[in-house]
Amino acid sequence: MTPVNVGLLGIVSLFVLVLLRVPVSVTMLIIALVGNIVLTPAGVAAAMAKFGSDLILMTQNYSLSVIPLFVLMGLLLSKADLGADLYEVANYSLGRLKGGMAMATIAASAAFGSVCGSVMAAVSTISSTAGLEMKKYGYDPYFAAGVTAVGSTLSIVIPPSTSLVVYGILTEESIGQVLMGGFIPGVMAMILLMLTVPVVLYFKPSLAPEAIKEKIPFPRHRAKYIWAVPAIFVVCIGGIYGGIFTPTESGAVGAFASLVFTILTGRMSWKIYLDSLKASVRVSAMTFLMIIGGSMFGQFLMRSRIPGYLVRFVMSLDVAPFWIVLVILLIYTILGTMMDAMAILVIMTPIIYPIIINLGYNGVWFGVMSIMMLLSGLCTPPVGIVSLLAAQINNLPSAKVFLMQWPFWVTLLISCVLLTAFPQIVLFLPNLMFRR
């Protein structure tokens, strides 16, 4: 059996095991181990020794240390009820408009994502507050849940995003540049999603109440806390942009600042602190296992020569690179309907990244584009985990929540088309960092 055939068999086996609900990280490690044994002429002992040494070297990757710090920062702020603070203040500004509470929910989700980095924390925090408030004021409950879910997906593209960090680790692109590349696209997607609300209500005005005439009281008890968002964001992301911090140092500063914030505001207790630490360890461990599995699977593919074969095949096609990229992004979208976003990222990146680079595209741009395409998968049945969680929190059937989201799903695809047509939207900030 040729190395290419071994690689193809490994890819097919991977998707079969994933469909059988075997954990993706475990599946990739098993296939990488078996594949390397088959491709090692020196025998099983030599393959096992090489596999073990590669695992040890991978766990010593300094870049991995940024993940638990960003995760802890997000969990501390989530448990400090900062998402509710942001929602109340955003609702004060937009709530009087027809659909204003829905737009406020999207804005609050994006703002919380800028200091959270975890889509699950964002949807849990925002949905538990915004969903109930929107229903109380006469919004369609399915529309309310759908909006909270869609808005929360922005957490995986607006820095500090753990998904962008994982992409940087897998491809050895600059993590700082990848993080900065997600900022403008994330803000652009937020604005487009907010503008989608009045468009939807124009065709279905019954989904939201009429504009409120009475003045919404200013939430002073909430507003005094939201200073933490710009402060922590500027310190963390501004520190990376200005070359003051490495991403790991930025995560450490952000986690410490979040801890200080929760203590100063009286929202910290020993139980909350321990719960945050335990959740951070659990999430980080799962992410580490996924990254290690993806890296080992990538090494196996390199040994099988699959990436090189695919590069030569794609380069031989008489097709403009733009159309090849669109097909790749379509594949990401389809996979997003069947698999978890992080799983797609670690499986597909080792296969697709060499093709993108050889087509002449920028690796930072493709990283942000990958994450943007996965946003739609987070809201798409049957594995739209964010929508399922929003439906569960609001005690609603998930099928109707999915149905209410399709206009926003189209908006996310339009955002991706804009980023494909105008790569400088992604590369503007990273290019400024490069010149410093």
Image (cartoon, rainbow, N blue to C red):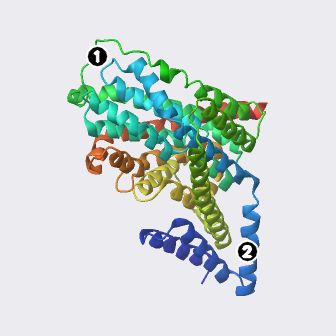
Where residue 265 appears, x then y in whole percent? 59, 29
The relative height of residue 199 versus residue 302 in the rendered view (above or below) is above
Q: Residue shown at 34%/49% (left/top)? A: 392
Three-letter code, disc 2: Gly
Pointer 2: what residue? Answer: 52
The quarter of the picture where the C terminus appears is: top right
Work out how far the residue at label 2 is from the one at label 1, CA to CA, in angstroms. 64 Å
N-terminal of the pair, mark 2 or mark 1, is 2
Nearer the observer, disc 2 or disc 1? Answer: 1
Tell me the tag on residue 253: none
**Element type where label 1 sits in the image:** loop
Number of on-image labels = 2
Which of the 4 quarters of the picture holds residue 355?
A: bottom right
Q: With respect to residue 393, does 334 lie above or below?
A: below
On screen, residue 49 above or below 97: below
Q: Residue drawn at (56%, 50%), measured in percent from left and top?
A: 275
**Residue at (63%, 34%) from the top-left corner?**
263
Let me know if residue 203 appears in the view: yes
Q: Residues within 10 Å of mark 1 (few under 14, many from 20)?
A: few
The residue lying at 45 percent from left, 72 percent from top is 16
- Give left or right: position of 203 versus 185: left
Residue tagged 1? 212
Quadrant containing the N terminus is: bottom right
Q: Position of residue 314 (x, y in %)?
A: 56, 58
Viewer-proximal residue, 260 or 117?
260
Q: Nearer the viewer, residue 246 or 311?
A: 246
Q: Does residue 434 sit above or below 294 in this rendering?
A: above
